[in-house]
Image: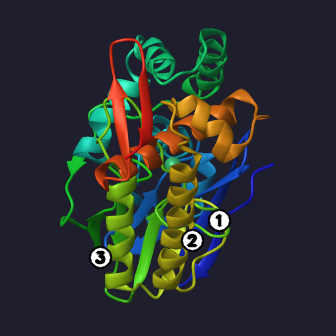
Amino acid sequence: MFASPVELEPGILRLTLPLPTGPRHVHCYLLRGDDGWTLVDTGLGLSGTPWDEIVAGLDAPVVRVFITHMHPDHVGDAAAAAAATGAPVLQGRLDYEQCERVWGSPDWPRRIADWFILNGVPEPVAEELLQSGHVFADFVRFAWNPVPVEPGNEVGEWRVFATPGHADGHLALLRDDGVMIAGDHVLTPITPAIGLYPESRPDPLGDYLASLALVEELAPRVAYSGHGEPVLDPAARAREIVAHHDRRLDAAQAALDGEPRSGYELSHALFGRELPPIQRRFAVAETLSHLERLVVLGRAVRHEDDRMVSYTAA
Ligand SMILES: [Zn+2]
């Protein structure tokens, strides 16, 4: 059942779409500007979202579709949204490069499975992780060759900020009145997943902590995010999330017991032994982002040959 957009404040509508897995929903936004509406994010390409109906309910045309990041629940229905609105899709340059590499190339699933094996995931488990990834791949219909956006650009009344971490090319929008459209950069009550993936920036958690410092500095009045509740004090929420990662960094360091340990082994120490494949995938990636941060901080050492990556305490 499709739920109509909800007005959060004048000219800002929230459109909540269903997801088949946790957190079960994603929020997209419609932003009224002088030139018409900007649609931010699109949901998965599965929900039968009635874009025609949504567009017909607006008092002006949708003049652009803006993508915060290339995760399936944000970019997945971009092609359909663009077709229904006739509007151009705007996406960060780096974000689109990764989007094309991950969702547009047939050999990506194999490359990510091999990379999990390198990080200690037993082969049968890596195959399970691979299959769980396919669940999403089938529902991603991103828009080819979008209009590239860069941090610092203006999109209507909004300024574009680079907020890497949750995704390398993640972008957020901020308006002069202190409203931030945050994508998955700051969430409440859940915390955004920060994972290391192959061919990504080397220290995503370091990137993320810097992006949280930016939120503290910008101190928006409110952040409207991709999941959960509006963040009413984004700077305070940023500090809470930093503290959460400090605790997890300490836990990751404590789990290094003298023997070389893979990201997969350590994910059991940090996230428990019993996890369904899709959650194990996130747990391994999240464990690795913390281990790589510890390496940068001089608190852990990475050992690597062509068969295995492992970590010890420094
Ligand atoms: Zn995301």
- Asked whether the beta carbons under mark 1 and mark 2 sit within 8 Å of each other, the answer is yes
Query: Can residue 212 be seen?
Result: yes
Q: Above or below — where is 156 with respect to 151?
A: below
Residue 190: x %, y % from top left? 65, 62
Type of amino acid under label 3:
Glu
Mark 2 crowdedness (10 Å alpha carbons): few <14, some 14-19, many ≥20? many
Q: Secondary structure at mark 1?
A: loop
Q: Above or below — where is 197 with respect to 121?
A: below
Query: Can residue 64 be seen?
Result: no
Residue 146: x %, y % from top left? 28, 40
Residue 121: x %, y % from top left? 57, 20
Q: Which mark is residue 209?
A: none
The first of marks 1 and 2 along the sequence is: 1
Residue 300: x %, y % from top left? 39, 46
Residue at the spot 73% in from the left edge and 46% down from the top edge: 22
Q: Above or below — where is 215 with respect to 118?
A: below
The CA distance from mark 3 to mark 1 is 21 Å
User: What coloring was used for the rendering?
Assistant: rainbow
- Asked whether the beta carbons under mark 3 and mark 2 sit within 8 Å of each other, the answer is no
Q: Above or below — where is 288 with respect to 179?
A: above
Residue under circle 1?
Answer: 5
Residue under circle 2?
Answer: 13
Name the foreground residue: 275 vs 225.
275
Residue under circle 3?
Answer: 157
4 vs 27, left or right, is: right
The CA distance from mark 3 to mark 2 is 16 Å
Residue at the spot 44% in from the left edge and 29% down from the top edge: 310
Name the foreground residue: 180 vs 145.
180
Most distant residue in the front direction: 258
